[in-house]
Amino acid sequence: MKKNISKGVYLVIDSSMDKEQALNQLKAVKNEKIAAIQIWNNPVVEKVDKCFLKDIVQLYKDVPVPILINEEWELLKEIDFDGVHFDNVPSDFPKIKQELDREFLKGITLSNDLEAVEKADKFSFDYVSFCSMFPSKTVDSCEIVHPDSVKKCRAITSMPIFLSGGINPDNMGLLQQLPFEGVAVVSGIMKATDPVKALRAYNKQLRNKN
């Protein structure tokens, strides 16, 4: 099944999360509207459990939600991921693409520096994701993104834009005037008591934007 990034909630899985808890949350939201799922290689984890990664891919094998790995593109050689989310456009990207020798989705993280957008367009990346719109413990390594940076990005690329960092249904109204296709969420769904209810709350706000 060929999978593509769609509009909506881009769900991020922290690789340091308890495996059973993560899989239970993912099972709960499997039939909901999700733009994509990314497994974030949290630096506190020395080595990601490949069985965990394979379980996630297998769980979503029969639904059109793409599964991406953060940075560790080599894993596409042994696990059937749909793509890779890079922190930056790799300088050796053509070599990476040649080595993988298959089509895969690709996205990058952006901040207020938009220099990488031209490179991403050059290599036909599929989307960009801004980090961080609001202060967040999950993405405390990102600078706060200025709204004008998002507007400037839309002026120079047609790639789908996702926003991340401290976003919840209550503060999404502050983003309504910005040009974006979806929001990236970590704990707001993966640590929610009712993940389906939480996901639907995000999707409701996104529908209101449109």
Image (cartoon, rainbow, N blue to C red):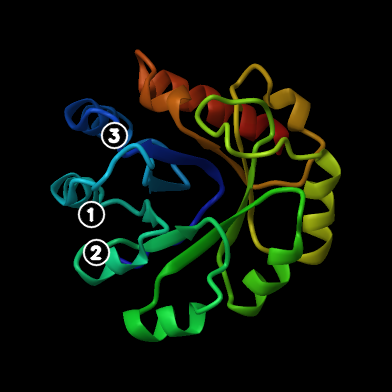
Q: How many angstroms separate mark 1 from mark 3 (CA)?
A: 13 Å
Q: Which of marks 2 and 1 is nearer the N terminus?
A: 1
Q: Position of residue 170 (x, y in %)?
A: 64, 16
Cβ atoms at labels 1 and 3 below 8 Å apart: no
Secondary structure beneath disc 2? loop
Vertical side of 81 occupied by 49: above or below: above
Vertical side of 19 occupied by 198: above or below: above
Q: How many angstroms separate mark 3 from mark 2 (CA)?
A: 18 Å
Foreground mark, 2 or 1, reads 2
At 17% from the left edge and 46% from the top edge, which residue is drawn? 55
Cβ atoms at labels 2 and 1 below 8 Å apart: yes
Residue receiving disc 1: 61
Name the foreground residue: 168 vs 14.
14
Q: Residue 80 carries which label?
A: 2
Mark 1, other Cα within 10 Å: few <14 / some 14–19 / many ≥20: some
Give the residue at the far left of this rendering.
51
Q: In which quarter of the image is residue 209?
A: top right
